[in-house]
Image: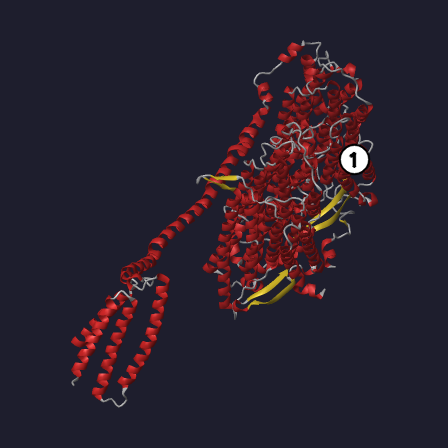
Amino acid sequence: MEWFDNGWGLVLTVFLPLAGAIVLLAIPRTKEDALKGVALVTSLATFAAGVALLGRFDFSRAGELQLGMDVPWIDAIGARFHIGVDGISLPLVVLSTFITLLVVLYSWDHWPEPHNPKLLLALVLILAVGMTGTFVALDLVLFFVFFEVVLLPMYFMIGIWGDRGIREVPVFGWKLEMRLYASLKFFVFTLFGSAFMLLGFLALYFRSGTILPERTFDIVRLSELGAAGAFTGTFAFWVFFALFLGFAVKVPMWPLHTWLPDAHTAAPTVGSVILAAILLKLGTYAFVRISIPILPQEAANWAWLIGLLAVIGIIYGSLACLAQTDMKRLIAYSSVGHMGFVMLGIATLTSIGINAAIIGMVAHGLITGLLFFLAGSMAHRYHTRDMGRLGGNMKLMPVMGVLLGFAAMASLGLPALAGFWGEFMALMASFDPLDGLDPGLFRGFMIAGAVGTVLTAGYMLWMLREVNFGEPADEWLGKEFHDVGTFEWLAWAPLVIATIALGVYPKLVFGMTNDAVVRLVEQAFGG
Amino acid sequence: MGILAAILPSVTLLLAAGGEEGGGVHVSDGGALAQWAWLIVVVPLVVPFLIVFFGKRLPFGGWELAVGTLAFIGLYGTALLLQNAANPIATEFTVEVARIGSYAIEWGWVVDGLSIMMYFLVGVVGFLVFVYAKGYMEGDIRFTWFFASFTLFAGGMLVLVSSPNLIQLIVGWELVGLASYLLIGHYWEDHANVDAANKAFMTNKVADAGLFIGAIIMALSVGSFSFHDALAVVAEGDAGSRLAVFGFWAGLALFVGAMGKSAQFPLHVWLPDAMAGPTPVSALMHAATMVTAGVYLLGRLFPFYLDHAGIFAGGVRPIIMVIGGITLFFMGLLAFVQNDIKKVLAYSTVSQLGYMVAAMGAGAYTAGLFHLFTHAFFKALLFLGAGSVIHAVHSNDMSDMGGLRTYMPKTFWTFVVGTLALIGLFPFAGFWSKDEIIASLYAAGQDGSGAAWFVFALAVGGSFVTAFYMGRAVFLTFFGEYKGHAHPHESPTTMTAPLVGLAVMAAVGGFLNAPGIATPFTEWLAARRFPMGDHHAEAVNWGLAGLVTLVLLVAVFLAYRIFAPDAETQADRDRFEIPVLYPILRRLYYLDDLYLDGVVRPIMGPVARLVLWVDMVVVDGIVNGAGVLARALSRAVRGVDARVVDGFYDGLAATTGGGGSVLRLFFTGKVQQYAALGFAGVVVLAVVFVVF
Amino acid sequence: MTIAQFVVLGAALFSLGLYGAITRRNAVLVLAGVELMLAAVNLNLVAFDAYLADQLVAGQVFTLFIIAVAAAEVGIGIAIVLMIFRNRHSAAVDELDLMRY
């Protein structure tokens, strides 16, 4: 296992899906079984590699980067192929491989129109490369490349298989196909953020040359510089702002969130799941991995604003949910609120808050992933997502109804399920933010966040009332509805089990993250 | 493998305390019985899944698993109670499941006087209710599912009362909420029931926001989630500690949480609506589980609230007392105007919870919890009796009843026992517990608390209210002519047997804590790791008891005069109405209207729509506007590009082309013209050379 | 004889040739005109050579070159004319404007 520990294990985890995608391209479109088989084997192998990472990871040194590799890559600009995992990134890497596997399983008998399994599976696998790659990259150029890799497959996914309904854009009076509008919006928004992010990276690169003998893109070395107070003043302010724009779009933070409801609603089921479960985490992860360690002083200066935007996101997202009639759009808006809790945790800059953020990310990935799976499957059966027409689902599809109830309860943060920890601990961290931050302000955030939990419960219960309960409308009577199918079970049961397991036994995540987070906070803010 | 070390729990169970700790309270560690007490918590959490997956294949549809679980809990609770009576137990066990920063997250179970009392109560009352529910729910469409939820309900409560720390308390707290949501909305085909379930969940969630905040403040002040650590700080009494700084706010926020579950004004609104669930659910919810959670929390943290020195949450106590007082009197009044027998009992529960909370506020730990204990029996009895009546006449409405004492004698007599216990007539259980509360309020008033005198007056008035509405309910239901349409009959033995069992407890339970006679209950509850330091009476204050008894007899007599059929005709009864008061009571003090029209509807309607409008029009509009702007800009750039930059090159090309088209006139293709021109050129050159 | 007489003769010959080359429609006659102009040039070259008594007899050498080139030119020219005539049944120069832009 020497080779595995020397970084090849991570390389395998990241690039195995790429190999799978290339193999897929060589198989003719008509041989669907072969295509599905290859995709399944690839994603299984990737997940196995992810689990093997867990096995080889030394948890007693969870705060250090492990299983990594650091070799020259683009010598001309000093960019290196530097990868590695610590307790912060490991759960997210495993989550990515896990979700990819479930998406492939779910796809087994759910193909969005136009029917093209080959392309869809290939795009899913390429997405997996970008997602896991982002979580392991320790070089800004490498990070940027992976960060951008996810963009195109998702763009095509939304653009090709997206919702063909007409989206009417108020004010401008446009009427255009949802998928076109959403995919373009997603792409342009993210690219807009990325441009600033790249600027920030370059600024750090050039500034590092004035301190070190040579310029570097290395996140670890830049973090050391940052901890030593190398980046301050106006320079740091603008760099942080640029990075903030890039990451906040991805999270997404209010008011940069409007691509999200459209993209999530328009995307095909697997696209929504990947978007919600993993893609949003790229932004929050980047805050923890890049912004805070490299620019700790600026992070402290900006914390009040991040916290404020996070809290606005929580309340605002929940209220927007209450006005929805489209079930999928409601779930999409709920992500704005949930990611608000994650960002609130990060904004406190304490070990409790960042721990909360990471378990919040994982939990949101599991729970919202499940919710989108369910919404997709229900839309597939009812051919509508309008909650005004749905109702009495418990009668038509009892098992699906129970699962929806479970997912909704988990999403509203029911204790002993995964979602609770992120919410509660984020609120807890807000009572005692980092020294130097205004505790009064953050305590206000805590109270607002607590109000947010009430509103979250409100719209989730309302959704259950509209969708699950009551008598079914006349239009569904006499129709045949297939309850949860085999491949749906295969894809969903692991999510349900993981949600319960994480809720009852949060050490599954905290056991990895705690040391790493404590170390990060100590390094950045001196304990 | 590092993963195992990191992921597996620390399997050693920590015996956290025992022995001499806690300044003179002699307690034992309870031995094996306490060590295995985790079964009480885990079994009812596992069984619901078994019922869901396998229940339908069993002969009784999963009921046997459910009732077996409750029997087990009841027996285990009784065993613990007996052991506690012989040798006081106060210990706790924890399993660490995560560490975040320096805070340990632990699951565990507490075995001390307070939690043993609750195990016993949940187990015994729950068992009787489950037996009863078999008969009541027979033939229900979701029989199996009902018992799974019902077991989870008990399980959630046991998680709550076994909790050694705030986190597990919150888990149990919300599990109970979830189970109650499932049970209240059991008949979800009708949206009205779903609305009642949502109301219960949402009201509790509002209170839970307070609980969350209180738990957070307390945990951060103490540096641990553990109740024991918090009470240790309280026992030290250090006015400079962080808990002293935030004690008032932590105490207040936690009390808000307690107000939700224990249905205190103004968060009581969910409880009467919770009647939408099947009657056994109401019986358990109003007796042993759920509504007792708030009082339990106050009991668990009692020294923190008692706080005679006023360092910690002592300042919250008058608030607690007044809230309890308002609840016990004014919510009791609401029972006057209810025609649904279950709603009468529901408001009665709210009112009795007010007594318990007021007692806690007055610093009477034993009195408050003893009333919780006795109330669990007689309120379960009353609900099951009401369920028996409803089962017989197929209506909740008391105007469909009347004269039932001849049709269903067992139900009648047990209901009467329950009523006498509830109104607190000597020597039934309620007399002892309620009298002690009133005595405690009196004592608190004598200690110089003005609020206590106010609440004391309300509590005495509350006795009148209680006796009046219960008298009304009994006379309307069991006396006079039968006015319904179904054929009433006595309920089956599975339903009446639990009634008799509960009636016995309701009749004699009070002697468990009869001051001056025998007070074993006080000793049981005192088995805590810290001294509670509460006030409890040495003997019955017969003067007070006489006053209260007089008041309630007057009330019963009035109720008899008004509602008993011999005195007045039915028409006169219906006309009985106190002006101004009754219309207000019928609108429930306009509280529900305020919440619905003032909070819920505006938020769900205009506010939510406004936010969505802002999102779709303003925020998204800015985004789309930016898109439009970018496009307009690109169009402008394209114009500049086409006209200016490109124009230059186009002009160049046009000039060249134009020149060419002029020149090409000379290229006719005619050789001889070329030759001639060539010659002409030569001539010109020749002339030039020659001349110049 | 003076040089002037040769020069005048040459000029006359050249003028005749030029006139024929420009005005005749028949391609053969145009070629004949060209030949006349070449002959006039040759006459001039020889006359000046003799008059100047050039040691290198450059005038005569150039004349010989021109005669050779003229022969080749006429050969090719006649061949082209023949081909054109065969294709178009005409040798009229003014109808040939294929080289027009």
Q: How many numbered discs?
A: 1
Residue C98 location, quadrant: bottom left
Residue B322 location, quadrant: top right
Determine if residue B425 is in view.
no
State the residue in front, B434 or A214: A214
Q: Answer above or below: position of B113 versus A51.
A: above
Residue type at mark 1 is Gly
State which quarter of the image contains the N terminus of chain B: bottom right
State which quarter of the image contains the C terminus of chain B: bottom left
Residue B256 location, quadrant: top right
Q: Position of residue A197 (x, y in %)?
A: 51, 56
Badge 1 density bin: few <14, some 14–19, many ≥20, Cα 10 Å: many
Q: Position of residue C16 (x, y in %)?
A: 21, 72
State the residue in front, A55 or B504: A55
Q: Position of residue B196 (x, y in %)?
A: 64, 29
Determine if residue A124 is in view.
yes
Q: Position of residue B252 (x, y in %)?
A: 61, 39
Can you name the residue that lies furthest to the bottom here? C55
State the residue in front, B331 or B285: B285
Q: Answer above or below: position of B92 versus A63.
A: above
State the residue in front, B14 or A424: A424
Q: Secondary structure at mark 1?
A: helix
Indicate the colouring scheme. Answer: secondary structure
- Residue in view at x 83 percent, y 45 percent: B32
- Left or right, residue A239 beside residue B520: left
- Residue in view at x 25 percent, y 77 percent: C39
Disc 1 chain ID: B
Mark 1, residue position: B55
